[in-house]
Image (cartoon, grey):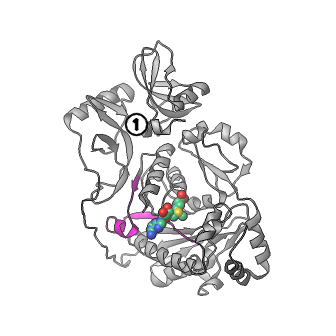
Amino acid sequence: MKLPSEFISKYQHLLGDEAPAFLAAFDQESQSGFRVNLLKAAPKATLATATGKVEYVPTGYRGPINGKSLDHVAGAIYSQEPSAMYVGEVVDPQPGERVLDLCAAPGGKTTHLVAKMGDQGLLVANEIFRKRALVLAENLERWGTRSTVVTNESPAELEGQFPRFFDRILVDAPCSGEGMFRKEPAGIEYWNPDYPAECANRQRKILASALKMLKPGGTLVYSTCTFAPEEDEQNAAWLLEEYPDLTMEEVKKYPGMDAGRPDWADGNPELTKAVRLFPHHLQGEGHFIAKFKLTANDGATPVKVRTKKKRGKKRPANNRLDRDHQAEFKEFCQWFMPDYQPNHLLTFGDQLYDLPAGIDSLDGLTVLRPGLHLGTFKKRRFEPALAWALTLRPGMTDREISLTDDQWRQYVHGDVITAASDQQNGWYLLTCQGLACGFGKLVNGTVKNFYPKGLRF
Ligand SMILES: C[S@@+](CC[C@H](N)C(=O)[O-])C[C@H]1O[C@@H](n2cnc3c(N)ncnc32)[C@H](O)[C@@H]1O
């Protein structure tokens, strides 16, 4: 791999004797892996092709995945390289907590966090760029979650909405990406000797916003996929210096992981509590992870937040259901899942969502996914959404049709499927190999296909 000469000399200077092994790693193959979704049935076929286990992530495996397999399309796995998987373990969110993933697209860490939370509590997944936020929302739909809201805001705008609100915040920061050069060589073109410092400045602004949203006693995890000390130890040192209420938490080092380097910042020995993942020391790409705790005392520095001006931005009308819609949804539930307990139903145009607990209003926010998308109100009927199906497990409803592998292929292709004719006409959850795949409407022995046209293949 052709690396910039200033990059080579920088790391020769920083790493000394270790530099040749570090630089040689750029010519080795990048690592692939996947995580298993504990919210769903085991992805047996993909597990059978795994080439190994990721030692430090209980749900992590090595090896490539097939993006068109049932396991992937039904959200039972997420493709993620092994080093990136450690971030979610370090955040370690618990069921019932309020968690913010501030720089979340395309959703590798978000999917990990929500699974660790058992989909219980509130997870706000935010992404500043709309196109990337749409991909994030789609990945979360496949993963299957009720407890996640996707917002499309800058950190500065978000801070006004959630002062001192979250138990845990992840800042998986936009960075110079040096640790991903093997995987995404195009990133090398952006690199110049000043780039890490530019990224570091942007990261400080993001961190400052994040801290305004952290509860006293809460934890902040800061991660990058770069080796640059400016963005790693020097930003961790800046946080400790700038925010006396923050302390560093030890991040566990598994074999092959390195401690943070105080000598690459201001010499503060606390920085060894952070972790560095170097490709020449372990089988994964380059990462840096630091964990901080905000003192739980009442005297925590009060926050000054900027409240966003609401200038005609698209946001959900926090509409309650009118009587007709209430009746249509009730009728659907009576047929499909009489014991479904919504948390907070709201409509967004003709779309019905179930807002997670822990958040009362989305006013003032640009929201792409206000919780679980349950379906669409059509003329005098309710049509359930794929997102809802993907949160369900076989056995949660009596209205279930189990597809063979061949029928599943017909389904994702958009074909009509023939089913046993002794079942009543109506909506059914379609499953295959224990995984929910979508909704189908049975009409006289034929299952009408409602798999979204844009997803068919
Ligand atoms: C390292 S990526 C996040 C990867 C993601 N956490 C995952 O695991 O899939 C950083 C993200 O920060 C976003 N970003 C870029 N500039 C930003 C800014 N000024 N403030 C907040 N986020 C920004 C990028 O669009 C990108 O999606």
Please give the name of the residue rendered at 70% of the width and 64% of the height, measured from the top-left corner. Answer: 254
How many numbered discs sit on the rendered protein?
1
Q: Secondary structure at mark 1?
A: loop
Query: With respect to residue 86, does 443 lie above or below?
Result: above
Please give the name of the residue rendered at 59% of the width and 80% of the height, measured from the top-left corner. Answer: 270
Q: Position of residue 200 (x, y in %)?
A: 52, 77
In the displayed structure, does residue 387 sit left or right of residue 370?
A: right
The amino acid sitting under disc 1 is: Ala
Of 398 and 4, the residue lying toward us: 4
Q: Which residues are magenta?
A: 149-176
Q: Position of residue 330 (x, y in %)?
A: 29, 31
Q: Which image quarter is the N terminus in? A: bottom right
Q: Quadrant of residue 179?
A: bottom right
Please give the name of the residue rendered at 34% of the width and 43% of the height, measured from the top-left corner. Answer: 353
Query: With respect to residue 170, does 316 lie above or below?
Result: above
Asked whether mark 1 and ligand 1 are closer than 8 Å, the reply comes as no
Q: Which image quarter is the C terminus in? A: top right
Q: Residue furthest bottom?
A: 266
Q: Residue furthest top?
A: 422
In the displayed structure, does residue 163 sit left or right of residue 141?
A: left
The residue where tag 1 is placed is 385
Query: With respect to residue 302, does 375 lie above or below?
Result: above
